[in-house]
Amino acid sequence: MFEIVTKKPLGPKVWLMDVVAPLVAGKAMPGQFLIVRTDAEGERIPLTVCDYDREKGQVTIVFQTVGAETERMSRLEVGDRFADVVGPLGNPSDLCELPMDELKKKKILFIAGGVGTAPVYNQLKWLHSNGVDVDCIQGARTKDLLILEDEMKAVTTNLYFATDDGSYGIHGNVCVALQQLWDQGVRYDHCVVIGPMIMMKFACQLTEKLGIHTMISMNTIMVDGTGMCGACRLLVGGEVKFACVDGPEFDGWKVDFNQAMQRSRLYKTEEGKLMLALEEGDTHHGNCGICS
């Protein structure tokens, strides 16, 4: 169980793995995530599902090595096994809840940044398989950091690339690309943005100005993944939510990105952790292993 059957690099420090997990593959829906542990002593790593194959009983995960545990994951090879793969967790994309005839009437745009391309791909593939036309803007700092390019092309009606340095596609970030499309008369009424928090913040500011209803995924701030630790606490429309159990997707116009980013910075200092516990009171669980 949980055997790695495929492993390949997608870019600098970014890896794709196909893992045998039939129970997860049998139930997973776009937008949901899972938790893996390298071994019995390993940390819990929440990862959004990049793809699933119900017949083979396999799930595809994409991760970037950003710490010791993900570095350990990257050293596993085909034939090795994860100690645990738990899921699917979280709520499916809100698009999965809409009647198909209503979904096909929508003009939908996805915006993917960095490794956020992996969960975007899962949703695009599901929509494509159901005959829904979707466009996507895929952004990165430079061409070498773009991932899953061929896979993304196969499941989109129009795929636009944006690179900060102009090495590929539109010269500029994803907001520059969206504004250019809008100025050319391209219109959308629904947008899903997944990527770094700062990218999602500015994309939501632009889509609100343009009047495009926008959903974002806060999977990047999850730690425990089950609602017990409180690390993924955020404010949505002034209400306390937790990304792992209430999301991971939320209305992007209602998310307090400034509070979420400030909270992430405070978690990095001892004094900041104490201040968060004081300010957040009962809604600060403090059991994530970071504060304790």
Image (cartoon, rainbow, N blue to C red):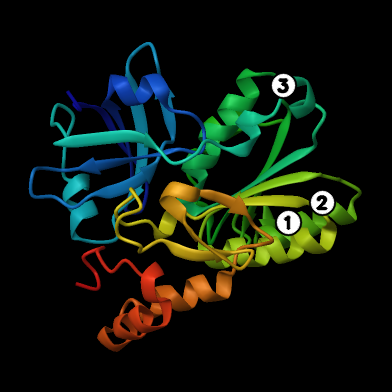
Q: Which one is in front in this view, the residue at disc 1 or the one at disc 3? A: 3
Question: Residue 5, percent across and down?
Answer: 24, 24
For residue 181, which numbered disc appears in the image? 2
Specify the quadrant that holds the C terminus.
bottom left
- Inspect the image, locate mark 3, and give the three-letter code of the amino acid beneath it: Met
Q: Nearer the viewer, mark 3 or mark 2?
A: 3
Q: Quadrant of the N terminus?
A: top left
* 148 vs 202: above or below: above
State how far apart marks 3 and 2 are (Cα).
26 Å
| Depth order, front residue of 172/18 | 18
Neighbour tally class for label 1: few under 14, some 14-19, many 20 plus, Cα within 10 Å = many
Label 1 vs 3, first from the N-terminus = 3
Q: Pinpoint residue 62: horizontal percent, then vertical percent.
A: 37, 42
The amino acid on which the numbered mark 2 sits, given as a three-letter code, is Leu
Q: In percent of the image, x 13 and y 31: which residue is there?
A: 80
Q: Residues within 10 Å of mark 3 (few under 14, many from 20)?
A: some
Which residue corresponds to mark 3?
Answer: 100
- Considering the numbered disc 2 on the image, is that residue within a helix, a strand or a loop? helix
Q: Residue furthest front?
A: 282
Nearer the observer, 71 or 86? 86
The quadrant where residue 28 appears: top left
Look at the numbered disc 1 and give the secondary structure of its residue.
helix
Residue beneath disc 1: 177
How far apart are labels 1 and 3 at the CA level? 29 Å
Q: CA distance from mark 1 to mark 2?
A: 6 Å
The residue drawn where x is 61% and y is 19% is 129
Q: Looking at numbered disc 1 in the image, what kind of residue is underneath it?
A: Ala
